[in-house]
Amino acid sequence: MAVCFVICAIGATNSETREHADDLLEEISTALEPFGMEAMRGDHNIDSKEVDTDVIERVQNAELCIADLSEENINVYYELGRRDETGKPVILLRRRGSAPLPVDIAGRRFIEYEIETRRGAREFRDILREAVKAESANGFQGSNGNATLAGVLQVLQRVERKIDRLGKAGGSGGAASATVAAGMPAGELPEGLSPSEAFNLALRTRNVPLAEASMDHLQWTMEKNRFYDIVVEQTASLGSQRATQMLFDYAQEFFDSDMSFTKKIEYLGIMVGAANRYDRELEIQEMVEEIAGVLDLQAQSAPAGSIDPSDYAAVYNQLNRLYHGIYATTDDTSYLYKAINALKKALSIHEAAYMYYNLAVCERHVDLPSARRDIDRCLELSGDNTDDDHLELACKIYREMDDPGYDDLLDRLREINPQKAMLLTVGN
């Protein structure tokens, strides 16, 4: 049975938050019945002494996720971020009358709901079913809203790092991380917390120094590959330069191990993302190219059906991310063409809307007709579930080509995201 994992604030037993979470889960379960899907939720046990990896695995492996962003909740934001890493579909919810969303996700599409009345609950189920129907028709492949967000975050992180170079103090991965990286002793764990508890706290609060201190303790209690897969990857994702270096140093051993193909793709993605964050793509280029070659051979020699084509294609999508990052840093167009070729190889393995979007992003700099062709294919695959970022890029390409289809695309974008449509027309 296909699984829909529900990400939401759960609260303590008998609390108002728990009662609402239970009611919401019931409504979602009812809405999913026509699709034969099971709605699951990961109730957090605050007394657990283990890293809550099973919840993250469910978040990343479920065919669909539904995230309720009605409350400001660290667990919800973290789990949504881990889902976004996969590029798989997620439907966002927001309770009517709840506080404004954080600025970094406020522009994303969401379903506004209220389930306190029978009419409201019925309308919510109907709207949710339509959204699930669109994802089901797309084979639960996602629509690249997540991949686009990841790209934006990489750019923002790069800008923040350059500001830090000019003397801005503080921030994740700042002075405390630099001290540890220079060989100073890791920070002490908070009194009364085990390393696993401290690591969970670090993830939920995005505290890089605490994550690094926890990492130093956890490495002696876990099998090495599992430690890198669970702890080092997540610490690097928080912005730890020390964990990033550890990923680079251990990469060959990890990829030579018997870890699953999917786990290796996850490791590769986080490693490339960290390199993008710190403009270190050239440093690991040769290693990543070698790893990609090995993974390609593994995929080709594996028994039929044993490796998901989307995972195989992801090998070349990561090469695209690496090359595009080098291009963004150096303005060397040869790397832009490398990125384009990597994406074409990925699409020859597995066709997905987000890859056509990425391809159009690259081609826009050097080949507008091809960019228009590929953004058209992206919109075709997305269908009624077209992402506003996809439409925004299509509008820019059509406008640059003086194509008469621009006005229709702008109208479509205006329906989904009026703010983006308005910004496109400013000064034109």
Image (tube, helix red, strand yellow):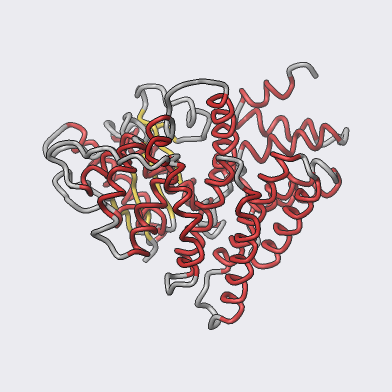
Classify residue 372 by image quadrant.
Answer: top right
Is 287 rendered above or below residue 157?
below
Tell me: 76 left or right of 64. left
Name the foreground residue: 1 vs 371.
Answer: 371
Name the foreground residue: 280 vs 123.
Answer: 280
The picture places residue 112, in percent across and down from the top left corner, at 42, 31
Q: Tell me how many marks there are.
A: 0
Tell me: 6 left or right of 396. left
Residue located at (65% from left, 28% from top): 414
Tell me: 273 left or right of 34. right
Classify residue 286 by image quadrant.
Answer: bottom right
The picture places residue 336, in percent across and down from the top left corner, at 76, 48
Residue farthest to the top, as pictured: 427
Residue located at (67% from left, 26% from top): 421
The picture places residue 274, in percent across and down from the top left corner, at 52, 46
Residue located at (65% from left, 61% from top): 351
